[in-house]
Image: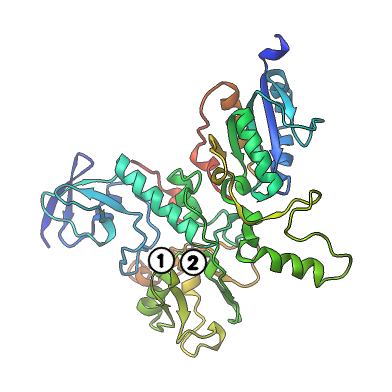
Amino acid sequence: MSVVTLTINDELASANSGQSLLEVIREHGIYIPTLCHMDGLSERGGCRMCLVEVQGMRTLQAACVTEVAEGMVVTTHSERLRKYRRMTLELIFAERNHVCAVCVMNGHCELQAVAAIEGMDHVRFDYLHPDLSMDISHPRFGLDHNRCILCTRCVRVCDEVEGAHTKDVMGRGINCRIVNDLNQAWGSSQSCTSCGKCVQVCPTGALFHKGVSVAEMVKRHDFLSWITLGREKNEWNYTGQPPYYATERRKE
Amino acid sequence: MAKKDKIRLATVWLGGCSGCHMSFLDLDERLIDLAEQADLVFSPIADAKAFPPDVDVTLVEGAVANIDHLELAKQVRAQSKIVVSFGDCAVTGNVTSLRNRLDVDDLLNRVYQEGPGRTPTGSDPDGIVPALLRRVVPLHQVIPVDAYIPGCPPDPDRIWTAVSALLAGEPVRLEEEMRYFG
């Protein structure tokens, strides 16, 4: 594995070739928001929160799906990036019914947190208020399309970690929906193992435990690294840590 | 200090639950400091029938849900120097806008005409009950808004941070922990 040298925000940084820009940026203690990224899952590059400027490239690059390269010059925070991140966030909020006040994840939601961190004080676009359903046919879990941001973490964890691939995405563009098996009621799925991984990785209140009320749902995203790395690290009991945005000091 | 040197403050209640106003009253003893610096010239908790002219700062709670809200919002904008979206309903539509997925006439028919009791007015204006707008919208979609205080309701510390900045003639800058919706 060769080492590459790059510049991040006017500071020299070294990284192993093959690493993603996001990984290296975070290793250097710099915070950039993410919504679809999750440690332990493959990258999707879908939420566009981790966009960075790379010198010599005309378009902004999603740091999670960009590999580091020798001599790369990267900017993680600028007026242009702030503008695009905020616009993307506003579009996410406008697309579905994100009503924080009556959401099971109020106070624990990654989308809500990223909006506060990025200073999104209002949404300039018209809210679409789509008429979306909920699937509460599963005995333990619920799927609320109103809160879904299509990050596909649930799809990836179900496929890559649990190996069931119950969840997938149907439709195109604004008609995209998370589906179970062949677009059927979750409770009737024969492939779902009811492991609940999808619920834990979901950044918003789209996937939740039945029986929780407003603000009662707390997700423990770090359970995933415990599953995948626990044996290596000799961690036999899951202790759980608060999510990254609640603990890490942010440095711009 | 002469009375007219005080800031002329107003609060308005549109399509909301008045929870933001309850939180405003939760300023507790800070209300005394506020009363020294500002006159409350219009509010659901003050006895004023019409929205007065030359208001310095107006806090607007609630989303714009009917034609009365729309009219009052325009009056507020015309007669206030600074207009603040006060709470999630004013900022995002929030709970008030949950009905947007439904057709207004279907909604009224279902609730009032198919249900028990006397049939009230529908969505047509009759001069008594204000007609509902087809869609509930946040305040900034009908008038320009100068500042935003999120929260359902915004807790008193947020309100005080914003209001004390406005009283000092400074822009509202809330810290990250005060910027959460919900």
Residue farthest to the right? B117
Q: Is residue A238 above or below residue A242?
A: below
Foreground pick, A224 / B182? B182
Q: Is residue A198 above or below residue B82?
A: below
Q: Chain of mark 1?
A: A
- Quarter in which the N terminus of chain A is drawn: bottom left
Q: Residue at coordinates 64% horizontally, 48% vertically from top-left?
A: B64
Which residue has dot 1 on it? A151
Q: Where does residue B76 sit, x and y in percent of width and height? A: 65, 34
Is residue B138 left or right of A235 when viewed as pictured? right
Residue type at mark 2? Cys
The structure's colour scheme is rainbow
Which residue has dot 2 on it? A148
Q: Chain of mark 2?
A: A
Residue farthest to the bottom? A190
Rendered image quadrant of residue A252: top left
Q: Where does residue A167 sit, x and y in percent of width and height? A: 44, 79
Task: Using the rendered image of the protein, determine whether residue A103 is visible from the camera's viewpoint.
Answer: yes
Residue type at mark 1? Cys
Q: Is residue A219 above or below residue A231?
A: above
The local secondary structure at tag 2 comes to loop
* Badge 2 density bin: few <14, some 14–19, many ≥20, Cα 10 Å: many
What mark, if any, has residue A96 been given in the picture? Answer: none
Foreground pick, A107 / A131? A131
Foreground pick, B142 / A229? B142
